[in-house]
Image (cartoon, rainbow, N blue to C red):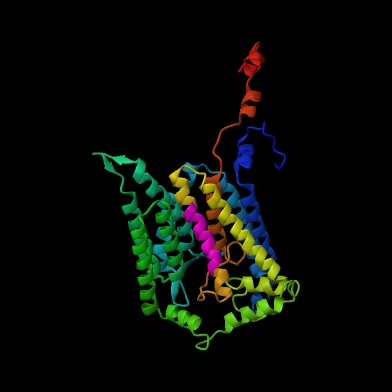
Amino acid sequence: MAGSSRVDSSAIARWWRNTDRVTLACVGILIGLGYVLMLAASPAVASRIGASRNMFILKQVIFLALAGAIVLGVSYLSRAGVKKLAFIGGILALAATAMTLVHGMEIKGARRWIALPMMSVQPSEFLKPCFAVMTGWLLSARRTVVLRGNIAFPGMLIAFACFGVILALLKSQPDIGMLSVITMVFMTQLFVDGLRLYWVGLCVAGMIGAFGMAFVMFPHVRSRVERFLHPDVGDHYQIDTALRAFGNGGLLGRGPGEGRVKDLLPDAHADFVFAVAGEEYGLLLCFGIITVFGIIVLRTLLKLMREEDPFVIVSAAGLVTGFGLQAFVNMGSTLHLIPTKGMTLPFISYGGSSAMSIALTMGMVLALTRHHVGPGKIAQRVATPYTPGSLLERNTP
């Protein structure tokens, strides 16, 4: 495929030429790191809970293989196909999220998961990419779609109504972290769409007020914030252990399999996998991981600066914001830069729902930012049958 000729006008060849191969390669690197770090972190966690040492590894191999297939499959879609997928997926994810309130598994006081034979699914993970694309279409359609009676399509009103429904569902679970990410994505999309600055200020003020309410209403939120602001208050075992892991690793790490943090942290394979990377492979790998995430986000935003379709701009901006924000929250929590929040590191932490929802996100980003053009002029010329005089006509100015 790397040697695909410009003359080749097949659908797969056009996809390969027009897809952002740098971003696709970065996704492949993250999936590869997910395999490596799962081999490092998961056996100790599995042994500690009395399971087979290979349990998490085998599951994650399947999850990441499916994630890779989803990235490739979704990136092949047209922009209209991405829109349809987002609407169908959004409706299903919204219904499944509502179902968790009645039939969901309760873990640590929250109902966020639906039990399946081989795994548990967190439907709200799939709300993030689907809602971002739906919002992008709704905000762009209000400028182009006109209803009967010359009435403008109320896209922003519908977008706010959808956000209100999602807010109510996630608050009821409760899942304040997911709600915060979706809120930030939604506000970013409103800003990119051209929301006036005073409305942006009101939205920021509303977010601060909502955070204050969460601090008062939810004890676990208050506990995490107080422990972040006052290091001498409460239990800091996980954060202290993670920070010691980075110190133990130094610049080059202790070597594969030589880390000790995975034997001490209950979530070393999930929320604190970044600490395992820092201890066993050192600061250089951590910088490398941050660089890969940065390349994906910045490259997508730079491509959007040359884009003319408002649907693509708003949708892809929301998708890549959610992707980058999730990575920041995970790494920032591990480094004690922000209050602790149980959020996975995209493609690297253990988790089936997370891996597949992030794969859906990146597949949509690649599909939306792909150059949607037909066969090139060279291919068209080669495909033109020869007739007497055609060569002369082609070379005529």
Residue shown at 65% from the left, 55% from the top: 28
Q: Quadrant of the C terminus?
A: top right
Give the image location of residue 292, x and y in percent: 63, 59
Q: Quadrant of the N terminus?
A: top right
Residue 160, visible in the rendered structure:
yes
Residue shown at 34% from the left, 46% from the top: 142
Give the image location of residue 102, x and y in percent: 39, 68
The residue lying furthest to the top in this view is 388
Rendered view: 110 above or below 234: above
Give the image location of residue 254, x and y in percent: 75, 75
Rendered view: 11 above or below 394: below
Rendered view: 150 above or below 289: above
Q: Is 154 situated left or right of 131 in this image?
A: left
Task: Please state which of residues 371 and 16 is positioned toward the viewer in this rendering.
Answer: 371
Residue 49, visible in the rendered structure:
no
Give the image location of residue 51, x and y in percent: 64, 75
Secondary structure of the magenta portion, mostly? helix
User: Which range is magenta?
Assistant: 317-329
**Residue 162 is a magenta residue:** no
Residue shown at 52% from the left, 44% from the top: 306
